[in-house]
Image: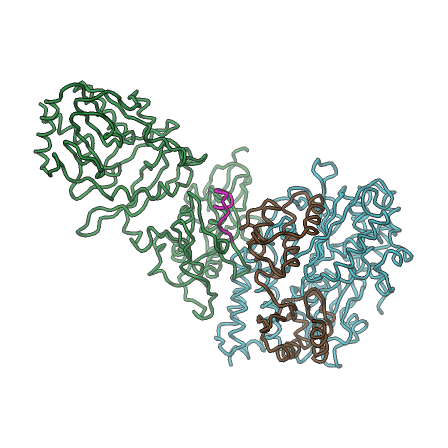
Amino acid sequence: MSFVFSKENLERIEALKSRYPSPKALLLPCLWMAQYQEGYISLDAIEVIGEVIDMPPMELYRVATFYTMFNLEPVGKYHIQLCKTLSCALRGKAQILAQLSNRLGIKPGESSQDGKYTLSQVECLGSCGTAPVMQINDRYYENLTPEKIDTILESLEEES
Amino acid sequence: MSQTEVVIDDKRFVAKEGSLLIDLLIKHNLKVPYFCYHEALGADGNCRMCMVEIEGQKRPQIACDTLIKEGMVVRTKGENIESVRRNILELELINHPVDCPICDQAGECKLQDFYMDYGLYDSHIDQADKVHHQKHIDLGSNVMLDQERCVLCARCTRFTADITKTHELGIIGRGDHARVSTMPGKKLDNPYAMNVVDLCPVGALTSKDFRFSQRVWFLTSTPSVCHGCAKGCNIFIDHNREKYKDETIYRFRPRENQAVNGYFICDEGRLSYKALQENRQVERDRNGAVCSEAEALKAYCKTLEGAKGEIIVLADPNLYREELVAIEAYAAHIGASLYAPLEHYRDEDFADDWLKSSQRAANAKAVEILEIKTTLPVEKAGLLISFNHPDAAQIKAEKVISFQTHIGKDAYDLTLPLAVFSESAGTLVNEEGIEQYCPRAIKRNEPIPTVIEWLTQIEGGDK
Amino acid sequence: MIKASRIVSRKFDIPGSHTLEVAKTHGAYDALSDAFAFSPAEIVEVIKESGLRGKGGGGAPAGTKWGLMPQDDPRPSYLVVNGDESEPGTFKDRQIISKDPHLLIEGIIITCYAIKAHDAYIYIRGEYCQFQQILQSAIDEAYAAGLLGERSGGEAYRVDITIHRGAGAYICGEKSALLESMEGKRGHPRLKPKQKEPEWYFGNPTLVNNVETIASVPYIVKNGARAYREFGTEHSPGTLLFAMSGHVEKPGVYEAEFGTPMLEYIEHYGGGVLGGRKLKAVIPGGASTAVLTADEVAYATLDYENLRAMHSALGTGGMIVMDEGTDMVEALKNLLEFYHHESCGQCTPCREGTGWSDTILGRVLEGRGRSEDIDKLLELADTMDGKTICVFAPAVAIVVRSFIGKFRDEFEAKASV
């Protein structure tokens, strides 16, 4: 198997085991660790986690496919997730999406050719007071305007 | 738990306090529709079809999640509750393909049954708007999956998770994109896998072995017992005689018996029907030449009369008890020693701790009770008469008469065809000592004699 | 006039309030000494007397729930804090987590002591990663200061807090689905128990409360039930972190006492409708409550009883404000897409009903509507209502009925094109 948890993650897993009544509780934490480590959750990782928490891989797989934040396929370096739910829609989500699509040359659900960006529309991000809002990887970007999109994308270009 | 009285549709019933209402309804054949509930798997509460009205409750309740309480008043009929079921059923059907004419489940499909009971309405959805999933997925172990026909009752996934504990199947994805699947690249692979076909209430899981072979309403089901091992799992033999053809078995299905096999059978037993129809010995063969029945009987008597030295009779420990008794009497009559060697039938690799026994002889227990010798005879025989015993060729004998169900590789002085268990009738005693009678299921166009029919003819010719 | 009512949000505007140092200078952890002077049963009594209601949306009396926890059970008891905040229009727990995490920790310590639990978990929606980090730092600080661990708050009472991160599933805000999720399963709500009992985590008695509910505990314990009842109404005592989003000038979270007139709240804190336009409708308590017309908003007050009487609900108190230009058909479609996406798929009526409702309305918006479509949506709402394991589908039914019932003309016009 090609997936191996990093030493640091293995230590975290051991520490977490003492925190819960059953190792099965570590399923979501382990999936997160695997996703951060590899960028996505591979089938190999699922097998390995199954051994760590003593759960058959299928039981893990069906859990992993239930939660929308787990990527079972690789995604772009920057995963842009634009909130599409009501408050954001009322505050101009459509223009933000248009701006993102234009700048990146991709539609929601697609990744840029260089694999750098993946664009998704997601349901309510719980940031309705600062709509429209998007998340790039773990960070929130709030009170978006088309101009702000330009600035954000430019800073990402510089970053890489 | 104490017994209590409840009222269902104005009739009184006695049931255990705290037991499941749905079990009582099923037991008394009070019709409520359901997909997800199964006695072997318990309640899951996902299909929401078994809605009933309970006095004092504002909303309809699912019978599979309702515990019997003293004085409970239940209503399973009436426009109100039937319209509730009709509406839920309509939702089950929206994403379901309308392919009953080509679906193998047709005729034993709960979706179809309930539609006839409650539905009968026009579709409100365009074909194009339906959620589409994958069809014709080969799951492995002879099981085919059509995700579009699935109602997500989770019976199959609960079977692999809770019963076989092999965890091959699971519901993946969410909402109306949820679907049954294996892990990518993995197969459904356990010795009981094909039970999911029976468990599936609709046509989502079908048997690769059975699909497209017969419409189920043409099949006749005869209760019987699997001969694959000494467990004695109860089965239905599903068979049909098509015009100009011989009566044919199309499948074995498990038959519920809580004392023996519960609801299930193993795949090897399930598929063992095939061997009953393949490579059968149908001709009488004397020294390599086909002969008539009269000639065969004549040859039999002549061989018996001319036998020098000891006569050994071998009996297959799969034969019915009545057949073994007849053979035992016949052997005594001709002064032969009788054996039913069991060694050949030991199979540790086959065994597990559930429905598969290491004793592969279905009637080994009857052999033991009849006190028939189970070792392999070592002495040289003047004449060996074998009733379908696989070890016949190993016995040293001057002359050999073999009654056999299947064509073997060994040639004998006289080879006579014998009916298989589905063409005969009698009693099996399983390894736990439970006696189970199996009626005759199959009548061939040109019948092959059973043990008793042969012995009757032989003894008749004797006189 | 609106009365200033800041119980939970008291420290929100103080710079650095998420750090232990700043929080402590503003009274953080002061309630611990009061709490440990009580017996656990006495604290449960105080919470009961205060009338504190669950602030995650349901509004069930918190004290009653606490009272279901066993006082002497050989199994360990657990506290699970529900921070899965995913109801559209709701973004209040996030404020506590990121602006006053020590208030939450303090509330957890007291609650654990009251229900005889030693281990608490905070389930936070996966998207709130950056806020979770703030909370984790606060927890780390609290451990370092001896406020958590073997001798929490300096008393011989162990409390350990572990953050459990969700991964994108609205339904996990439902308490039994949340516990399933924490047990490493799909977030499927559980069948309801036949009698009143605690929740169960790996078979152990467990209390599940919303972040804001727990954050309200220190104030009540420190100041008494009566002080809490100074705010709000008789049946809805205290305050809530109400919120506004959509077409308002100053969207955001502003704590107010229960019973505050809705329109006054929107005017006072929200600065009125965006651009001075006319109000059309408000969804009062997160997406899953019945929409109110502008006429109804005029006499709505922000408490459980009033909104219930109006056939809506207070829910999470997250108001979505819509101005006169809002297309109500599009708005409902937006919400149906949400429900379609978030249905866990366990029960047939919800799995198929949400999807089909979304499909039908999509067809209407594409100009492929049929004359019977609007009634079909209402019929579907009936099929989804009261026939499923959890209240997800019934909530969808309420939303559909209220939108169509109150703005039927707009729906008819679109369907008949």
Residue C181 is a magenta residue: no
Residue at 36% x, 60% y is B100
Residue B150 or residue B137, whichever sits in front: B137
* Chain shown in brown: A
Q: Colour of chain B?
A: green
Is B361 on the left or on the right of C220, as rendered?
A: left
- Determine the image quadrant of residue A91: bottom right
Please tell me whether residue A101 is drawn above or below residue C155 in the rendered image: below
Residue C111 or residue A138, whichever sits in front: A138
Residue B162 is a magenta residue: yes
Please tell me whether residue B400 is drawn above or below residue A56 in the rendered image: above
Q: Colour of chain C?
A: cyan
Q: What is the quadrant of the N terminus of chain C in the image? A: bottom right
- Determine the image quadrant of residue C249: bottom right
Residue C20 or residue B247, whichever sits in front: C20
Please state the extent of the stretch shown in magenta in the rendering: B159-170
